[in-house]
Image (cartoon, grey):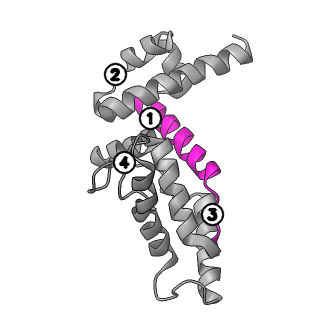
Amino acid sequence: MSPRKSDATRRRLLDAATADFAAHGIAGARVDRIAAAAGVNKAQLYAYFGDKLGLFGAVFRLHADAVVDSVPFTADDLAGYAVRLYDAAVARPELVRLATWAKLEGVATDNLATESSAGAAKLRAIAEAQRAGQVDASIEPRDVLALLIAMALAWSPSGLAAATTPGDAATDHDRRK
């Protein structure tokens, strides 16, 4: 199989798996349904990802990386970071659904907020801003980041407030931000 065809097959599998996992959760997702939607056989799916959890991990990382890459972080503008996360969650609700399913089903995902290299850089930046007096130093950097993420996702499907959608009125989005 050529590299281009291989990349296209892998992408179709990731797209089909995203839809299935987001809709049905990890336990409810079906490998045969995902393979059929991607136009491949189950053996190809297993060759690419090993098993269903391997596929879920690849899907989760794909969407999490896209959000991390698209949401710039600076410790001098933590409120702006929370607003950009809010916007990313509205634009990519599948990531929020995937993360929620993982939590509900007890499937460990990397703690992208604090344990990835991007997360570690954010924690260092927050600690530096605390030393400079820009951020309250009485709160642990991990807790500052967790609070920012919680605020940004308060209106997501995993939050307790009414879930936001891209179709909500601009005034509603502005008020939440």
Give the residue displayed 43% in from the left and 38% down from the top: 94
Task: Please tell me whether the stretch drawn in magenta is mainly helix, strand or loop.
Answer: helix
- Location of residue 10 in the rendering, given as x and y in whole percent from the top left corner: 59, 22
Q: Residue 73 has which mark?
A: 3
Q: Earlier in the sequence, mark 1 or mark 4?
A: 1
Q: Quadrant of residue 23?
A: top left
Q: Residue at x 59, y 52 (%)?
A: 68
Tag 1: amino acid: Phe
The residue under label 1 is 56
Type of the residue with mark 2: Arg
Q: Nearer the viewer, mark 2 or mark 3?
A: 3
C-alpha separation, residue under disc 1 versus residue under disc 3: 26 Å
Residue 74: say if magenta.
yes
Residue 154 location, x and y as percent? Answer: 36, 59
Report which residue position mark 4 lands on.
Answer: 164
Q: Secondary structure at mark 4?
A: loop
Q: Is residue 158 magenta?
A: no
In the shown orientation, is residue 170 left or right of residue 77?
left
Which kind of residue does numbered mark 4 sit on? Answer: Thr
Q: Given the image, on which type of amino acid does mark 3 rest?
A: Phe
